Amino acid sequence: MSVLLNTLEPLWELVSRCLKRLTNADAHAALALQPSAEAFFLVYGSELSSADPSKLHDHPDAQKLLHFAEKHRNMLNQVLRQNGGGLTDGPFAVLTQMPKLLDFDVKRIYFRKQMQKIDERVRAEDVAVRIRRSHLFSDSFRELFRLRGPEWKARFYIIFEGEEGQDAGGLLREWFSIITREIFNPNYALFITSPGDRVTYMINKSSYINPEHLEYFKFVGRIIAKAIYENKLLECYFTRAFYKHILSVPVRAQDLESEDPSFYKSLEFLLNNPIEDLGTELTFTLEVEEFGVRKMRMLKEDGSSIPVTDGNKEEYVKLVCQMKMTGSINQQLNAFLEGFYEIIPKHLISIFNEQELELLISGLPNVDIDDLYANR
């Protein structure tokens, strides 16, 4: 098979050159060669269908596909915009395993189509949600927490007690708007604003003061996933690390800057200066607070006996950041993710990056130009 594929190399090189010339002249003209591009993906993509997804980028055919797709990214995204189902099946479907090559709007079209398929399979009868405006969060929790994950995919029919009117969609939008604000109500102790920017929200590691906090976090995970499912934008913005947790993307030192600016600066100093300048000895351990109890955690096996040196300090910082941004909120985060993934599959939301996930949840923020000018 490899010998046969090698004989096609001159053809693919010719197709690539023609695509490049046509794209430079007119992006739409390049679509004339779409069948040739599909043939390329059909040949090499079929070899990847049985490959281990975690080792996909090590596969030689994947390297050829990646190189071709990077070179002609604009044309491929233009094709996929015109053919909304192009990622669902057919030769270009393999690109869902290489989401960095796809534009946000193309991913969103694919995501919506996949959610529609889920909707067709599991959409249940409408769910009436009877709530009091004065107790909107607690009443919503009482009414909805008993529902199983698939039942959350049903249409919610909002009824405000003491008010007349049919919910044709407006009451649901209003409900999402109000409950989003309630999620961040300090009385529930679920989230706090990040110290770094005082705008984005992060999980409150002291949420344990609320006895029902884990059930509430699962509920909030469902609420946010339900909003995405229903294509309703929410007025809430989280830290970059929080979005990465949803996407199962490892956090980095830069993500800590908004959550703990002083600790981030100490890590920056550690990375940019010799260890002896610290005046203290470090090991691969970190003290974290879990539910009000401070515990010493190993960052790696036998970490208490491994000193931090200039040679391994980058690994130390990486592990510290992961522990700092997950260790003290692990149970809360797991509860949130459990609720979220009941409605939106993990593999499907993972095609987005953290910036795109923020757009999917909240859209573009409203910027008050006059306020920015007054406080410049």
Image: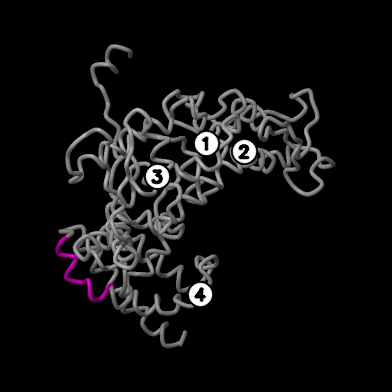
Q: Give the range drawn in magenta.
A: 28-37
Coloring scheme used: one colour
**Most foreground residue, 7 or 354:** 354
| Pointer 4 or 1: first along the chain | 4
> What x and y, as percent, mark residue 153?
34, 56
Kind of residue at disc 2? Cys
Question: Compared with residue 40, is residue 363 higher up or lower down, i.e. above or below?
Answer: above
Q: Could you classify mark 2 by the number of other residues whose Cα lies within 10 Å: few (under 14), some (14-19), or many (20 or more)?
A: many
On the image, which quarter does residue 28 sit in? bottom left
- Count the marks: 4
Q: Main secondary structure of the magenta part?
A: helix
Kind of residue at disc 1? Asp
Reading the image, the residue beneath label 4 is: 51
**Most foreground residue, 118 or 264:** 118
Reading the image, the residue beneath label 3 is: 143
> What x and y, as percent, mark residue 256?
55, 33
Q: Label 2, label 4: how many angstroms apart (C-alpha)?
A: 32 Å
| Pointer 4 or 3: first along the chain | 4
Helix, strand or loop status at disc 3: helix
| Pointer 2 or 3: first along the chain | 3
Q: Could you classify mark 3 by the number of other residues whose Cα lies within 10 Å: few (under 14), some (14-19), or many (20 or more)?
A: some
Reading the image, the residue beneath label 1 is: 255
**Residue ranking furthest to the right:** 305
Residue 309 horizontal side relative to residue 57, left or right: right
Q: Could you classify mark 1 by the number of other residues whose Cα lies within 10 Å: few (under 14), some (14-19), or many (20 or more)?
A: some
